[in-house]
Amino acid sequence: SSSHSSVSGAWAPQPGLMEALQELGYEYRSGRLLQVGVDKGFEFKDQQHYDKLADAVLRYVGTLLVDQAGLVPIRLPLEIQEGPHSTIFASRGYEEAEKLLLIIQGSGRVRVGVWGCALCINASLDQGTMLPYLRLAAERNYGVIVLNPNENSEGGQPVLGSETAERHIAYVWSHIVLKRCKSTAAVDIVAHSNGG
């Protein structure tokens, strides 16, 4: 593997994410969000509970990109260790792939790896996340980069190069795709909603 795929220590799996879901009364079983101890899906209590659950689901999906899809986190901006950052995820060896797949979610609350938070809560992880695309891309020998255009600030401070979704995508294109990937690689892009 190329030295470019080394991961700076920015992103680390967050322990206890399933426990955080369980504290809210839910857990994922077979890719579906179910109430702890019973086979019942999501039931709305109030907006505050829903917001906490949605945030926990979004954090949980980030760990699945590593644990299930085998992706590695890459901290942006590159070469800068301090200050606000955003994290994208890439398959191992993406730099040498003959085919490259860039995946971009829509705007709003959704975070890296998620098409729709409500789908993750009310339907399944296969319907609400990029995991099925990542499985298929791996089967078809694609190098993959999952962008994170909605993570534009940290602690109220803008992320350099990712201040907006458009700047984030341009940064990944110029600093990752053009500089690290094979110049002959075929590039396919899957973008949802405002991500396209």
Image: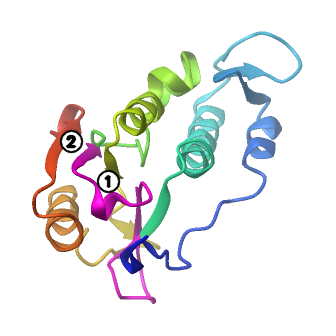
- The mark tally for this picture is 2
Q: Position of residue 161 (x, y in %)?
A: 22, 74
Magenta region, residue range:
75-103
Q: Are marks 1 and 2 in contact (CB under 8 Å)?
A: yes
Is residue 121 part of the magenta span, yes or no? Answer: no
Above or below 17: residue 87: below
Q: Position of residue 121 (x, y in %)?
A: 57, 24
Residue occupying image coordinates x 49% and y 74%: 7
Is residue 76 part of the magenta span, yes or no? Answer: yes
Q: Which residue is mark 1?
A: 147
Q: Which mark is residue 157?
A: none
Q: Earlier in the sequence, mark 1 or mark 2?
A: 1
* Residue type, mark 2 in image: Gly
Q: Which residue is mark 2?
A: 195
Above or below 118: residue 19: below
Residue occupying image coordinates x 37% and y 68%: 153
